[in-house]
Amino acid sequence: MKIKYSDGVLRAQKKNRPILALESTIISHGMPFPDNLEFAKKAEALCRDSGVEPATIAVLDGTPCVGLNKEQLNRVSNSAKMKKISKNDLSVSLAMNWSGATTVSSTAHIAKMANISVFSTGGIGGVNREAERTFDISQDLTTISKTPIIIVTAGAKSILDIPRTVEALEALGVTTLGYKTNVFPAFFYRDSGVFGPVLVNSSKEIVNVFKKNLELGISSATLVTNPIPRKDEIPRESIDLFIKEAHEQLSERPISGKDVTPFLLKYIVERSEGKSLQANIALALNNVRVGIKVAKEIIRA
Ligand code: PSU
Ligand code: MN
């Protein structure tokens, strides 16, 4: 498999320096331009300032890219032609020369192939509300259960059915940790009310669990749920109304499949006058901060 590495990632790999994988669908389909580009640059700068090499992952012209240069990052942020590529479309995207952003499922898969052990996202996909009618369950969940890396996420997106997502993670045998919490975080707010993650207090504990998964031959990712910082959270009462409205709008339109999540996020950004975007950026950067600590710890371990 041909993977195109950035110069920075190649150097870091050679010198055994820490690397943090980052996904690109959050940039291309999760946030509007130019805030998305600003966010992506900030995430990468946070990594570099801490001595960690960022490896933003995407598929460009049919080639999986691990680490993007400036021009490539611009392209991912600001091209209407970027597809949303999940794991089911990964082979197709290479065979058909597509360019697109990778979701949690495809990013995790490529990171594993590239020998990168830590990956920070915003919030994983999961069981959608009304999944009993639509069957809409993100392939992030099955990939997470089959890809032995560490994934840092702000719980699962508030637009989902969180209790069912937590149950699905358990059913799939996913090792789920809570960074300084034992309550599953709900993306825009800290507390979904669902207990489940095992409380961990340090990157060392996270890496120890991850290593045990590897020793046991367990394929599950080590999923680290990390609540949005208190100062950035949007209370459930304020965001729930917009989430409900977004679902009503969705049910009146012919939108399905991979277009659902981008539609809902965009609607809520507009309806909240950008507040949800600020929260999304804050939680994703917070996941990068924890990812940085864990990536450094892995090198020490
Ligand atoms: N986190 C965010 N914004 C996003 C995503 C994650 O803060 O847009 C993306 C990820 O790429 C995730 C995808 O894998 O949303 C889930 O899409 P779906 O529900 O269609 O599986
Ligand atoms: Mn879906």
Image: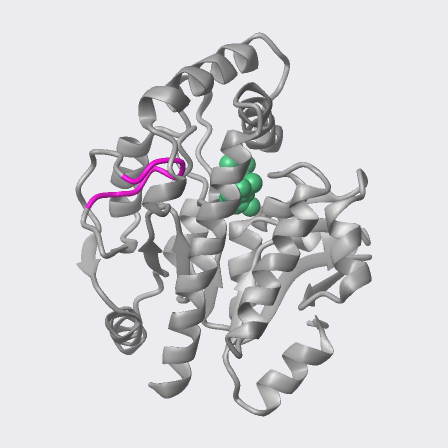
Where does residue 300 sit, x and y in percent of width and height? 37, 87
The quarter of the image holding the C terminus is: bottom left
Where does residue 55 sit, x and y in percent of width and height? 61, 68
Residue at 41 percent across and 41 percent down: it is 232
Q: How is the image coloured?
A: one colour
Q: 63 or 11, which is in the foreground?
A: 11
Where does residue 185 sit, x and y in percent of width and height? 30, 42
Image quarter for residue 265?
Answer: top right
Residue at 64 percent across and 14 percent down: it is 254
Q: Which residues are magenta?
A: 183-190
- Taking the magenta stretch, the answer to whether it contains residue 185 is yes
In this rendering, the answer to whether 132 lies above or below 4 is: above
Q: 50 or 8, which is in the foreground?
A: 50
Q: Does residue 283 show up?
A: yes
Residue at 41 percent across and 59 percent down: it is 151
Q: 157 or 241, which is in the foreground?
A: 241
